[in-house]
Amino acid sequence: MQNVKCKIKVTFFVFFIFLSCLSHAQEFTYEFSGKIIEQPAYYFLKDDYLLNPNGEILDFSLSKNRFYGDINFNLDYQNFKFISKFRPTVLSDKKDTNIKTIIDDGYLDIGFKDRFFLYLGKRNIRDGVGLGSNPTDFLGEGKEVDMAKREEERRVEREGNYLIGMDTYFKDITLTAIFAPHIKELQDEKDRVILKAGFLMEPLNTDISFHYFNSSIPGAGINISTTIGESLVLHTESALRWGSDRKIVRLIQEGSPNLYEIYHPDDNQTIYPHIAAGGHYTFKDGTNVILEYLYNGDGYNSEEWNTLKGFIKYSYDEYKTGFLKELMKGNLLQANEIMRFRELRRNYIFARISNSGITEKIDGALVFLLNTDDKSFLIYPSVDYKIKGNTTVGFSAIIFVGENDTEFGMTHWGSEVSMVYRYFF
Amino acid sequence: MCKKIKMQDSRCKIQVLHLKFLLATIFLQLATCNLQLSFALTPQEVLEKVDNIRAPDRTFIFNLKVTVKKGDDEDVSEFSVRVKDAKKSLVVFKSPPSNKGRVLLMVEDNMWIYIPGTRNPIRISPQQQIMGRVSNGDVARVVYNLDYNVESLENEGEIIKMTLAAKTKGAAYKSINLWIEKETFKPIKAEFFALSGKLLKTGYYKGYKEILGKERPTIIEIHDGIKEPEISIMEYSNIKLEDTPDAHFQKTFMERVK
């Protein structure tokens, strides 16, 4: 697998150089831009909590440093475009230093008569109008994102999928078809197909799009956004999924020890709704308030959650007593795999207040995400300061609040602070 | 004798009536002149004449440089703008580097912003300002008649003062006072008012140059009505009649725009 990845990288590099050379030809135009980012983060780790008794199960670093480039290199030749976005990254923590290059985009885009566009390569397709959650962002599922980034930034710095697609534009209508195949040792997911139709209804100040997704967990979705008056935008992003990849914990037998089973329910016939619905309002002074209700159909209901909690608490207690320590450790490791700390339960409220012009140089935002099922929440304040036209510095924190057996109360750290320095070129 | 006096008296009355009629006619003519400007144009047509000076056609492109000066500080932003059928605008941010690649799309009252480095294009409300101190409408809309109705016209010698009132949600201002040259319809000065009636800014149309067959302003100097020492200079260049395909004015196309 490493070998294949290496070959891909080399091919990409050669292609890149080749295109760079061709760019000297007159018909070629190219664009090179991006940013260099230094992003240290510090974590206030917990010493002893349900998922990690005495801090012995998992070992986290107190701090991490991420130094990376977010580089765009695009070439145009008549109706051909080569678009690339990649991130050479140096990630270091107390244990080691990793150097890697993540390719978000690297694809060829061919236009026909300004109406049909065919693209082939690696591309980070992002769908959805929601902010707190994106149920119709089918191709982004399972991709690694940096949770320390602002909500709207996370999905952009995300590794793309190998795919072939076509966009067709009519007046106020866009039709899209995408095929992302399973590629041995390169793209583990099963073959995925997306069909989309987007419409603008000008007189209603509304745009709407329909999505169909075919893969191991098929889905269908709808996005609607509309402007009401001069300050309010309402939106909804909803999807139905035929099945789920969730893991359920079941108590098989009470005894000494209790026997639990973690399984994927065979429920491909069950339809799970996922909804993000809300809006944003802009006040006269530029303050923007976003409020969204998020419904996660395959999240744990009370019974499932209580069983999971019981499993974790039991394993924690027994581990502390020293009873079947290795078994309990295994249980807790499995529990840690299940915990995503986001959309684990069903009902959430997402709110964000921001102002891009607190002063001429400061842009601030405050995010609040409440799990209404167990009342735990996270707060995420962030401030960006524009030093010059090409330099900004930002500070942010994520603070988790909740009882020790709630979703956000079970996180590995109580809070996280980070700084980000960006140099644009 | 008595009859003579009576006759003279009635003639006198007739003369007075004539005089009154004449004065009324002159007054009415003056009033009509005030409203109709003796051009036989409706107020909205006058506004269209003004717009025809600002915009060379309904479909065109231009570059815009906005320099915001405040004391010793100077912020420069550059945009490339494509306008189609007067009501569709596509604004591509060229500088500073931190804003490069941003795209603002306006289709009538629908507005979207695409910010590279953030998520996909999002619908924004007209109230959301994404260009700092310059309003979205200032950059994306070059004509007034799409968003404003003429409420009144006042003759001020060689100058006409027009009062414009917002007629769409996409209008950046509640009302505008616009001063134009009576003979040429060239805009000279504009005052922009917020919903509260507060004066937001005053613009001066300058740098008239012969472009595409007409003298057109290439500079609008905007003095902030709230932050007194702040001046924004909007410089228009490379104004050309060039069509842009319909596909470019779709939300789904914004990522492709360079």
Image (cartoon, coloured by chain):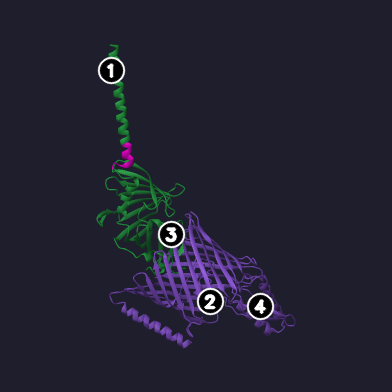
Determine whether the residue tagged by mark 3 lies in a helix, strand or loop: helix
Q: Chain of mark 2?
A: A
Q: CA distance from mark 4 to mark 2?
A: 21 Å
The residues tagged by marks 4 and 1 sit, at their Cα atoms, a distance apart of 117 Å
Give me the disc on residue B8: 1
In the figure, the purple chain has which letter?
Answer: A
Callout 1 and callout 2 share a chain: no
- What residue would you read off at disc 3? A202
Task: Tell me the magenta residue range.
Answer: B30-38
According to the picture, the residue beneath numbered tag 2 turns out to be A142
Q: Which type of secondary structure does the marked residue at label 2 adopt?
A: loop
Q: Which SS type dominates the magenta stretch?
A: helix
* Structural distance between the alpha carbons of marks 3 and 4: 49 Å
| Mark 4 lies on residue | A249
Q: x and y percent of residue A373 in the render? A: 64, 67
Mark 2 touches mark 3? (CB < 8 Å): no
Q: Residues within 10 Å of mark 4 (few under 14, many from 20)?
A: many
Pick the front one: B213 or A335:
B213
